[in-house]
Image (spheres, rainbow, N blue to C red):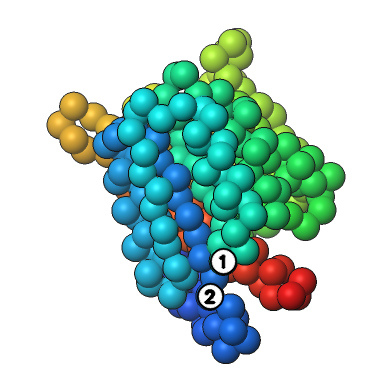
Amino acid sequence: MAAIIIDGKQLSTSKRNELAKEVEQIKEKGLLPKLVVILVGDNPASLSYIRGKQKAAEEIGVGFQLEHYPESFTEKELLDVIENYNNNDEYHGILVQLPLPAHIDETAVVETISPLKDVDGFHPVNIGRMMTGQETFLPCTPAGIVEMIKSVGVEIAGKNVVVVGRSNIVGKPVGQLLLNEHATVTYCHSKTKDLSSFTKEADILVAAVGRANFIKGEDIKPGAVVIDVGVNRLDTGKLCGDVVFEEAKEVASYLTPVPGGVGPMTITMLAHNTVQSAKQFLTKK
Ligand SMILES: Nc1nc(=O)c2c([nH]1)NC[C@@H]1CN(c3ccc(C(=O)N[C@@H](CCC(=O)O)C(=O)O)cc3)C=[N+]21
């Protein structure tokens, strides 16, 4: 039996329609939700992702500002820009596009963004709140993954989750969110011995390795839910996941595609966080 494909584009469309209604209500109360995206340098992938973010903002009626600086921009200059937006209450979300040029300390940048406007959910305060299960901005890719699993009615509690990858923006937080949903979570990574002995036991397998076609059909438990977080650009220009899609389709019960899976949901959750942030500002006014 072929797997059911979890359509991230379709799910995004319905979530964005709901967000558009929320934005209408916020505007009726006299507030325009607004996001600023800060980009340093001209990374082509970053420019492409930012276009996606702008499109989502426009679709739901959220204001969008791009601050684009040259590769030579200094860390001090960048921190000053962030401080200005921290203090500008016309803006409810601040996102600094990663990766940053090597001469800029990413940690210093992330820690300068006000936790109240950190719609990426990367600030240590928000990560701490997520770990302790408090309400906060959740990191967009992990939050999108949880939404995708829930959208097909799969129960998370009690399931064996295996996360392959341990980055701070995907692997670690997605494991934490699924633990918060009462899954039993195992993290695997480049030093894991006999990786497939773990992946084969996964009821829910999250592939966030960043290597094209890394997870094969034979690594997957029959009937598993497979979430492919890979965004690998091949020399042909084609976007490719971490999972061999055609093989996984024959083994999994549910499977996310690349493109059209986790990517669009990531952007939708960013829009969600921006709207939630604006609502917080409404109640504080
Ligand atoms: N501060 C920060 N926040 C981020 O959220 C962030 C970041 N930096 N740096 C880079 C990663 C990557 N990321 C993606 C978002 C959307 C797609 C996406 O929409 N992908 C489409 C395809 C888009 C295309 O073809 O280029 C899809 O999968 O269907 C992919 C990747 C967000 N990131």
Instruction: Tell me if 113 is positioned left or right of 141 in this view.
Output: right
Q: Nearer the viewer, residue 204 or 144?
A: 144
269 or 147: which is nearer to us? 269
CA gap, disc 1 and disc 2: 8 Å
Please tell me which residue is depicted at 68% across the width and 48% down the height of the picture: 114
The answer to whether residue 113 is left or right of residue 54 is right
Residue 163 appears in the figure? no
Q: Mark 2 highlights which residue? A: 32
Rendered location of residue 263, percent (x, y): 41, 49
Q: Give the side of residue 244 with respect to residue 220, left or right.
A: left
At mark 1, the secondary structure is loop
- Residue displayed at 36% across by 26% down: 72
Above or below for 257 versus 110:
below
Q: Residues within 10 Å of mark 1 (few under 14, many from 20)?
A: some
Q: Amino acid at mark 2?
A: Leu
Residue 145 percent location from the top left of the image:
55, 50
- The mark tally for this picture is 2
**Left or right, residue 223 beside residue 235:** right
Which residue corresponds to the image point at 41% horizontal and 30% vertical from the top-left?
A: 73
Q: Is residue 44 above or below residue 209?
A: below
Residue at 45% over, 50% down: 37
Q: Nearer the viewer, residue 109 or 237?
A: 109
Residue 125 in percent (x, y) is at 76, 42
The quadrant where residue 184 appears:
top right
Q: Quadrant of the C terminus?
A: bottom right
Q: Which residue is mark 1?
A: 90
Nearer the observer: mark 1 or 2; the answer is 1
Q: Is mark 2 within 8 Å of ligand 1?
A: no
| Residue 94 shows up from this direction | yes
Task: Kindly tell me whether mark 1's CB lies below 8 Å from ligand 1.
Answer: no
The reply to whether discs 1 and 2 touch (Cβ–Cβ < 8 Å) is yes
